[in-house]
Image: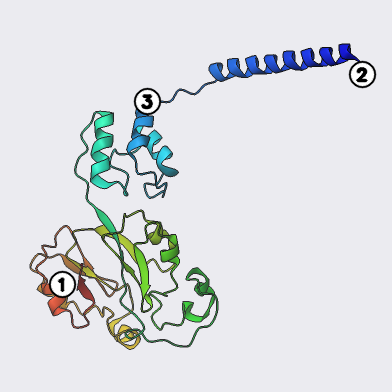
Amino acid sequence: MNITAIIIATVVVSVVGLFIGLFLGIAGIKFAVEVDEREEAILGVLPGNNCGGCGYPGCSGLAAAIVKGEAAVNACPVGGEPVGKMVAEIMGVEAGEATRMVAFVKCQGDCEKAKVDYEYTGVEDCAMLSFVPNGGPKSCNYGCLGYGNCVKACPFDAIHVVNGVAVVDKEACKACGKCVAACPKNLIELIPYDAKYVVACSSKEKGPVTMKECSVGCIGCTLCAKNCPNDAVKIENFLSVIDQDKCEGCGICMEKCPKKSIVKHD
């Protein structure tokens, strides 16, 4: 073995390693991206769920957007008002009032209340049922399919299928919106946590058709709208709609509804 060759090889490897190290060090300094300290501070107070409910790619994306002025300081639906106030303090601005939102499933057509056209045996996936006759076995084409795509999408275990219909636990819900996006029937929407009464139906069929399909479907009879003292209820496409900004929670709409389509938001 040639000792001289070994020594030369060792020196060459060392020199090359030193050169690469120096090059990378200089490049790191020269091309370093400056990170606003506020961005790191905001990231530190965000919950870290990376759910995307804010509309940005994870908490780091939201933090960067807030610092750039592209997102509101209270844009995190999971952190809610408490986190919004901490972010506002970091940014040196007022947080403003934030309305807590929760998901709500606009359907009560469970296994007893909704009629079915046939027995379905196949892939238990709500999105896949768009390829089967009538979009699923239930007679109502607007009803919850009950196969839990929303349940799988929820990162907070806040929604479950009960007797064939998805039900939201409003206390556990963080309003990330993932269940809203997962529902192929567009049955889930975000509503104020403090909403008193809600329409638990999405059917836009005329009354006689709805009555044949579901015992608790809205038939657009207008009794709720006619009796609301605050003009908070109207009928759109044969379906009752409540304006939560006008609703004062008197409950008359629920009392007058002959099909019990309007329910208390407990």
Tell me residue 212's x, y (percent): 33, 88
- Which of labels 2 and 1 is toward the front? 2
Residue ranking furthest to the right: 1
Query: How far separated are the C-alphas under marks 2 and 3?
Result: 57 Å
SS class, disc 2: loop
Q: Residues within 10 Å of mark 1 (few under 14, many from 20)?
A: many
Amino acid type at image mark 2: Met
Q: Count the marks.
A: 3
- Kindly identify the amino acid type of the residue bearing the numbered disc 1: Ala
Q: CA distance from mark 2 to mark 1?
A: 99 Å
Q: Quadrant of residue 23?
A: top right
Observer-nearest residue: 172 or 11? 11
Q: Nearer the viewer, residue 96 or 23?
A: 23
- From where the camera sits, is residue 183 visible? no
* Residue shown at 42% from the left, 38% from the top: 60
Residue designated by label 2 = 1
